Amino acid sequence: MQYFNIQVASQLSGVASATIRAWEKRYNAVIPDRAENKHRLYSETDIEKLAVLFRLTELGQSIGKIAHLGLEELKEVYARLMHKPYEDKHVLSPNHDKIDTEKMLNSFFLALSAYKLDIISHELEKAKSLLSPRELCLNILIPLFQEIGNKVYRNELSMAQEHTVSALVRFYLGQMIGQHYQKALLRDELILITTPEGEMHEVGILGAALLCVNYGIKIIYLGANLPAESLAEAANALNAKAIILGATRDDLTFELSLDEYLKKLKLNLTCNPSLLIGGNIKHHVRTELEKKKIKFFPTLNALDEYLSKF
Protein backbone atom coordinates (compact mmCIF):
# COMPACT_ATOMS: atom_id res chain seq x y z
CA MET A 1 0.00 0.00 0.00
CA GLN A 2 1.21 3.49 -0.84
CA TYR A 3 1.24 6.43 1.58
CA PHE A 4 0.99 10.09 0.60
CA ASN A 5 1.57 13.45 2.26
CA ILE A 6 -1.32 15.84 2.84
CA GLN A 7 -0.70 17.87 -0.33
CA VAL A 8 -1.01 14.78 -2.54
CA ALA A 9 -3.94 13.45 -0.48
CA SER A 10 -5.69 16.77 -1.06
CA GLN A 11 -5.07 16.71 -4.81
CA LEU A 12 -6.19 13.09 -5.19
CA SER A 13 -9.29 13.29 -2.99
CA GLY A 14 -10.45 16.78 -3.98
CA VAL A 15 -10.58 17.88 -0.33
CA ALA A 16 -8.63 21.01 0.65
CA SER A 17 -5.73 20.43 3.05
CA ALA A 18 -7.31 22.73 5.66
CA THR A 19 -10.58 20.78 5.41
CA ILE A 20 -8.78 17.46 5.83
CA ARG A 21 -7.16 18.75 9.03
CA ALA A 22 -10.50 20.05 10.30
CA TRP A 23 -12.29 16.75 9.59
CA GLU A 24 -9.51 14.90 11.42
CA LYS A 25 -9.53 17.17 14.46
CA ARG A 26 -13.30 17.55 14.87
CA TYR A 27 -14.67 14.23 13.64
CA ASN A 28 -11.79 11.72 13.40
CA ALA A 29 -12.84 11.20 9.77
CA VAL A 30 -9.42 9.68 9.05
CA ILE A 31 -6.49 9.03 11.36
CA PRO A 32 -3.30 9.31 9.30
CA ASP A 33 -0.01 7.74 10.24
CA ARG A 34 2.97 9.95 10.94
CA ALA A 35 6.40 10.05 9.35
CA GLU A 36 9.50 10.40 11.51
CA ASN A 37 9.29 14.17 11.01
CA LYS A 38 5.67 14.04 12.35
CA HIS A 39 4.15 14.93 8.97
CA ARG A 40 0.88 13.22 8.12
CA LEU A 41 0.93 10.16 5.83
CA TYR A 42 -2.36 9.04 4.27
CA SER A 43 -3.07 5.52 3.05
CA GLU A 44 -4.95 4.69 -0.13
CA THR A 45 -8.02 3.85 2.01
CA ASP A 46 -7.78 7.20 3.81
CA ILE A 47 -7.77 9.06 0.51
CA GLU A 48 -10.67 7.08 -0.92
CA LYS A 49 -12.70 7.73 2.23
CA LEU A 50 -11.97 11.45 1.99
CA ALA A 51 -13.13 11.42 -1.63
CA VAL A 52 -16.41 9.68 -0.77
CA LEU A 53 -17.02 12.03 2.18
CA PHE A 54 -16.44 14.98 -0.12
CA ARG A 55 -18.98 13.71 -2.65
CA LEU A 56 -21.55 13.07 0.08
CA THR A 57 -21.14 16.55 1.58
CA GLU A 58 -21.71 17.95 -1.91
CA LEU A 59 -25.01 16.05 -1.87
CA GLY A 60 -26.03 17.81 1.35
CA GLN A 61 -24.92 15.29 3.97
CA SER A 62 -23.59 16.66 7.25
CA ILE A 63 -19.95 15.73 7.77
CA GLY A 64 -20.58 15.40 11.50
CA LYS A 65 -23.16 12.67 10.91
CA ILE A 66 -21.19 10.57 8.42
CA ALA A 67 -17.51 11.05 9.29
CA HIS A 68 -17.53 8.11 11.73
CA LEU A 69 -18.76 5.64 9.10
CA GLY A 70 -16.43 3.17 7.41
CA LEU A 71 -15.64 3.33 3.71
CA GLU A 72 -18.11 0.62 2.67
CA GLU A 73 -20.86 2.17 4.79
CA LEU A 74 -20.25 5.52 3.11
CA LYS A 75 -20.54 3.88 -0.30
CA GLU A 76 -23.89 2.38 0.78
CA VAL A 77 -25.11 5.83 1.85
CA TYR A 78 -24.11 7.17 -1.55
CA ALA A 79 -25.91 4.30 -3.33
CA ARG A 80 -29.14 4.97 -1.38
CA LEU A 81 -29.02 8.67 -2.16
CA MET A 82 -28.20 8.32 -5.85
CA HIS A 83 -30.12 5.07 -6.50
CA LYS A 84 -27.04 3.59 -8.11
CA PRO A 85 -23.80 1.98 -6.88
CA TYR A 86 -20.90 4.19 -5.93
CA GLU A 87 -18.54 4.55 -8.90
CA ASP A 88 -14.83 4.50 -8.18
CA LYS A 89 -13.37 7.64 -9.72
CA HIS A 90 -9.83 6.21 -9.44
CA VAL A 91 -8.74 8.96 -7.11
CA LEU A 92 -5.42 7.18 -6.66
CA SER A 93 -4.50 7.46 -10.31
CA PRO A 94 -2.80 10.85 -10.30
CA ASN A 95 -4.52 13.41 -12.54
CA HIS A 96 -1.75 15.15 -14.42
CA ASP A 97 -4.01 18.12 -15.05
CA LYS A 98 -3.70 18.63 -11.29
CA ILE A 99 -0.07 17.62 -10.85
CA ASP A 100 1.52 18.74 -14.12
CA THR A 101 4.75 16.74 -14.23
CA GLU A 102 5.54 17.99 -17.75
CA LYS A 103 5.44 21.59 -16.57
CA MET A 104 7.51 20.63 -13.53
CA LEU A 105 10.09 18.94 -15.76
CA ASN A 106 10.30 22.00 -18.03
CA SER A 107 11.09 24.08 -14.94
CA PHE A 108 13.95 21.71 -14.18
CA PHE A 109 15.26 22.03 -17.74
CA LEU A 110 15.13 25.84 -17.66
CA ALA A 111 16.94 25.93 -14.32
CA LEU A 112 19.50 23.45 -15.61
CA SER A 113 20.12 25.53 -18.77
CA ALA A 114 20.90 28.57 -16.62
CA TYR A 115 22.66 26.45 -13.96
CA LYS A 116 20.41 27.92 -11.26
CA LEU A 117 21.06 25.62 -8.31
CA ASP A 118 18.61 27.47 -6.03
CA ILE A 119 15.78 26.92 -8.51
CA ILE A 120 16.76 23.29 -9.00
CA SER A 121 16.67 22.83 -5.21
CA HIS A 122 13.26 24.50 -5.03
CA GLU A 123 11.85 22.30 -7.79
CA LEU A 124 13.26 19.16 -6.18
CA GLU A 125 11.65 20.07 -2.86
CA LYS A 126 8.33 20.67 -4.63
CA ALA A 127 8.55 17.41 -6.57
CA LYS A 128 9.36 15.51 -3.39
CA SER A 129 6.27 16.95 -1.71
CA LEU A 130 3.78 16.53 -4.55
CA LEU A 131 4.75 13.36 -6.36
CA SER A 132 4.68 9.71 -5.38
CA PRO A 133 8.07 7.93 -5.32
CA ARG A 134 7.18 6.17 -8.59
CA GLU A 135 6.22 9.41 -10.34
CA LEU A 136 9.37 11.14 -9.14
CA CYS A 137 11.49 8.27 -10.45
CA LEU A 138 9.86 7.71 -13.85
CA ASN A 139 8.56 11.19 -14.74
CA ILE A 140 11.31 13.41 -13.34
CA LEU A 141 14.49 11.48 -12.52
CA ILE A 142 14.88 9.62 -15.82
CA PRO A 143 14.29 12.54 -18.26
CA LEU A 144 16.23 14.95 -16.03
CA PHE A 145 19.39 12.85 -16.10
CA GLN A 146 19.00 12.17 -19.81
CA GLU A 147 19.03 15.93 -20.30
CA ILE A 148 22.03 16.33 -17.99
CA GLY A 149 23.90 13.69 -20.00
CA ASN A 150 23.02 15.46 -23.25
CA LYS A 151 24.26 18.79 -21.92
CA VAL A 152 27.55 17.29 -20.77
CA TYR A 153 27.98 15.67 -24.19
CA ARG A 154 27.36 19.03 -25.91
CA ASN A 155 29.76 20.77 -23.48
CA GLU A 156 26.90 22.87 -22.13
CA LEU A 157 27.61 21.54 -18.65
CA SER A 158 31.02 20.80 -17.19
CA MET A 159 31.72 17.61 -15.30
CA ALA A 160 31.95 19.66 -12.11
CA GLN A 161 28.49 21.11 -12.75
CA GLU A 162 27.10 17.63 -13.47
CA HIS A 163 28.50 16.36 -10.17
CA THR A 164 27.01 19.31 -8.28
CA VAL A 165 23.53 18.81 -9.75
CA SER A 166 23.80 15.04 -9.17
CA ALA A 167 24.70 15.67 -5.53
CA LEU A 168 21.62 17.88 -5.13
CA VAL A 169 19.39 15.21 -6.65
CA ARG A 170 20.92 12.49 -4.44
CA PHE A 171 20.27 14.63 -1.37
CA TYR A 172 16.57 15.14 -2.11
CA LEU A 173 15.96 11.59 -3.27
CA GLY A 174 17.68 10.32 -0.15
CA GLN A 175 15.33 12.48 1.92
CA MET A 176 12.31 11.02 0.16
CA ILE A 177 13.53 7.45 0.66
CA GLY A 178 14.19 8.18 4.32
CA GLN A 179 10.82 9.88 4.80
CA HIS A 180 8.94 6.89 3.40
CA TYR A 181 11.22 4.21 4.75
CA GLN A 182 9.15 3.27 7.79
CA LYS A 183 6.07 3.03 5.59
CA ALA A 184 7.89 0.78 3.15
CA LEU A 185 8.29 -2.04 5.65
CA LEU A 186 5.04 -3.73 4.65
CA ARG A 187 6.47 -7.03 3.40
CA ASP A 188 8.84 -9.54 4.92
CA GLU A 189 10.90 -9.85 1.74
CA LEU A 190 14.08 -7.78 1.89
CA ILE A 191 15.92 -6.29 -1.10
CA LEU A 192 19.45 -4.94 -0.85
CA ILE A 193 20.30 -2.14 -3.30
CA THR A 194 23.83 -1.16 -4.32
CA THR A 195 26.35 -0.94 -7.17
CA PRO A 196 29.37 -3.23 -7.58
CA GLU A 197 32.84 -2.21 -6.52
CA GLY A 198 34.21 0.27 -9.06
CA GLU A 199 30.73 1.44 -10.16
CA MET A 200 30.25 4.98 -8.88
CA HIS A 201 27.00 5.95 -10.67
CA GLU A 202 24.26 6.09 -8.03
CA VAL A 203 21.26 7.65 -9.75
CA GLY A 204 19.95 4.35 -11.13
CA ILE A 205 19.91 2.62 -7.76
CA LEU A 206 18.29 5.65 -6.13
CA GLY A 207 15.54 5.30 -8.73
CA ALA A 208 15.29 1.58 -7.94
CA ALA A 209 14.97 2.41 -4.23
CA LEU A 210 12.14 4.85 -4.95
CA LEU A 211 10.29 2.18 -6.94
CA CYS A 212 10.68 -0.34 -4.11
CA VAL A 213 9.39 2.20 -1.61
CA ASN A 214 6.44 2.88 -3.88
CA TYR A 215 5.44 -0.79 -3.88
CA GLY A 216 5.90 -1.26 -0.13
CA ILE A 217 8.97 -3.47 -0.46
CA LYS A 218 11.40 -3.57 2.43
CA ILE A 219 14.82 -2.33 1.35
CA ILE A 220 18.24 -1.57 2.70
CA TYR A 221 20.05 0.99 0.57
CA LEU A 222 23.78 0.30 0.69
CA GLY A 223 24.99 3.06 -1.63
CA ALA A 224 27.49 2.73 -4.44
CA ASN A 225 30.84 0.96 -4.90
CA LEU A 226 30.34 -2.03 -2.57
CA PRO A 227 32.87 -4.91 -2.61
CA ALA A 228 31.41 -8.35 -3.34
CA GLU A 229 32.51 -9.74 0.02
CA SER A 230 30.76 -6.92 1.92
CA LEU A 231 27.56 -7.35 -0.09
CA ALA A 232 27.58 -11.12 0.49
CA GLU A 233 28.13 -10.61 4.22
CA ALA A 234 25.14 -8.26 4.42
CA ALA A 235 22.93 -10.57 2.35
CA ASN A 236 23.83 -13.60 4.48
CA ALA A 237 23.26 -11.79 7.77
CA LEU A 238 19.89 -10.39 6.67
CA ASN A 239 18.74 -13.37 4.57
CA ALA A 240 17.96 -11.07 1.65
CA LYS A 241 15.35 -12.21 -0.84
CA ALA A 242 16.91 -10.21 -3.68
CA ILE A 243 19.80 -7.93 -4.56
CA ILE A 244 19.48 -5.05 -7.01
CA LEU A 245 22.79 -4.09 -8.63
CA GLY A 246 23.13 -1.00 -10.78
CA ALA A 247 25.84 -1.27 -13.43
CA THR A 248 26.65 1.15 -16.24
CA ARG A 249 29.90 -0.54 -17.29
CA ASP A 250 31.10 -4.08 -17.93
CA ASP A 251 34.65 -3.34 -16.72
CA LEU A 252 34.05 -1.99 -13.22
CA THR A 253 37.74 -1.43 -12.51
CA PHE A 254 40.92 -2.32 -14.30
CA GLU A 255 41.16 -5.41 -12.12
CA LEU A 256 37.50 -6.46 -11.88
CA SER A 257 34.80 -7.13 -14.47
CA LEU A 258 31.07 -7.51 -13.77
CA ASP A 259 31.35 -11.24 -14.42
CA GLU A 260 34.22 -11.60 -11.95
CA TYR A 261 32.32 -9.54 -9.38
CA LEU A 262 29.28 -11.82 -9.66
CA LYS A 263 31.46 -14.93 -9.34
CA LYS A 264 33.06 -13.52 -6.19
CA LEU A 265 29.63 -12.57 -4.83
CA LYS A 266 28.16 -16.05 -5.37
CA LEU A 267 31.24 -17.68 -3.87
CA ASN A 268 30.64 -15.80 -0.61
CA LEU A 269 26.86 -16.15 -0.44
CA THR A 270 25.36 -18.74 1.88
CA CYS A 271 21.78 -17.59 1.23
CA ASN A 272 20.17 -17.67 -2.22
CA PRO A 273 18.88 -14.20 -3.16
CA SER A 274 17.61 -13.39 -6.63
CA LEU A 275 20.03 -11.16 -8.52
CA LEU A 276 18.49 -8.23 -10.38
CA ILE A 277 20.87 -6.17 -12.52
CA GLY A 278 19.99 -2.93 -14.22
CA GLY A 279 21.90 -0.49 -16.34
CA ASN A 280 23.49 0.21 -19.67
CA ILE A 281 25.79 -2.73 -20.41
CA LYS A 282 26.79 -4.48 -23.62
CA HIS A 283 24.46 -6.92 -25.35
CA HIS A 284 26.76 -9.93 -25.05
CA VAL A 285 27.00 -9.36 -21.28
CA ARG A 286 23.21 -9.30 -21.05
CA THR A 287 23.08 -12.59 -22.94
CA GLU A 288 25.49 -14.17 -20.47
CA LEU A 289 23.37 -12.92 -17.55
CA GLU A 290 20.26 -14.49 -19.06
CA LYS A 291 22.07 -17.82 -19.45
CA LYS A 292 22.85 -17.70 -15.72
CA LYS A 293 19.18 -17.01 -14.87
CA ILE A 294 20.05 -13.49 -13.68
CA LYS A 295 17.31 -10.97 -14.42
CA PHE A 296 18.44 -7.90 -16.33
CA PHE A 297 16.52 -4.63 -16.58
CA PRO A 298 17.73 -2.18 -19.24
CA THR A 299 15.53 0.63 -17.87
CA LEU A 300 13.85 1.69 -14.65
CA ASN A 301 10.52 1.31 -16.45
CA ALA A 302 11.28 -2.39 -16.93
CA LEU A 303 12.21 -2.71 -13.25
CA ASP A 304 8.99 -0.89 -12.32
CA GLU A 305 6.91 -3.46 -14.22
CA TYR A 306 8.72 -6.32 -12.46
CA LEU A 307 8.41 -4.81 -8.98
CA SER A 308 4.69 -4.18 -9.46
CA LYS A 309 4.28 -7.98 -9.52
CA PHE A 310 7.03 -8.79 -6.98
Image: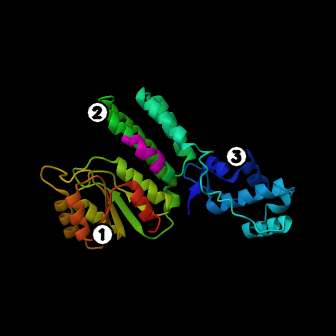
Q: CA distance from mark 1 to mark 3?
A: 45 Å
Instruction: Indicate yes or no whether the magenta region holds residue 111.
Output: no
Instruction: Select label 3 or label 2 by which is in front.
Output: 2
Task: Give the secondary structure at mark 1.
Answer: helix
Stretch in magenta: 137-146
**Considering the image in quadrants, where does the C terminus appear?**
bottom left
> Which mark, residue 236?
1
**For this view, does 245 lie left or right of residue 254?**
right
Q: Which mark is residue 17?
A: 3
Which secondary structure class fits the magenta region best?
helix
Label 3: how many residues lie within 10 Å, few (<14), some (14-19) or many (20+)?
A: some
Q: Nearer the viewer, residue 37 or 46?
A: 46
Q: Dot 3 lies on which element?
A: helix
Check the image and report above or below for 250 versus 66. Answer: above
Q: Could you tell me how far apart the alpha carbons at marks 3 and 2 are, in whole angstroms?
A: 42 Å
Instruction: Give, as a three-letter code, the residue at label 3.
Output: Ser
Residue 10 appears at what percent x and percent y? 67, 49
The mark that comes first in sequence, 2 or 1, is 2
Expressed as whole percent of the image width and height from the top left, the position of residue 218 reads: 45, 63
- Looking at the image, the residue that sits furthest to the left is 255
- Residue 190 image offset from top left, x and y in percent: 40, 66
1 or 3: tag closer to the N-terminus: 3
Magenta-span inclusion, residue 140: yes
Q: Amino acid at mark 2?
A: Met
Q: Residue at x 26, y 67 (%)?
A: 290
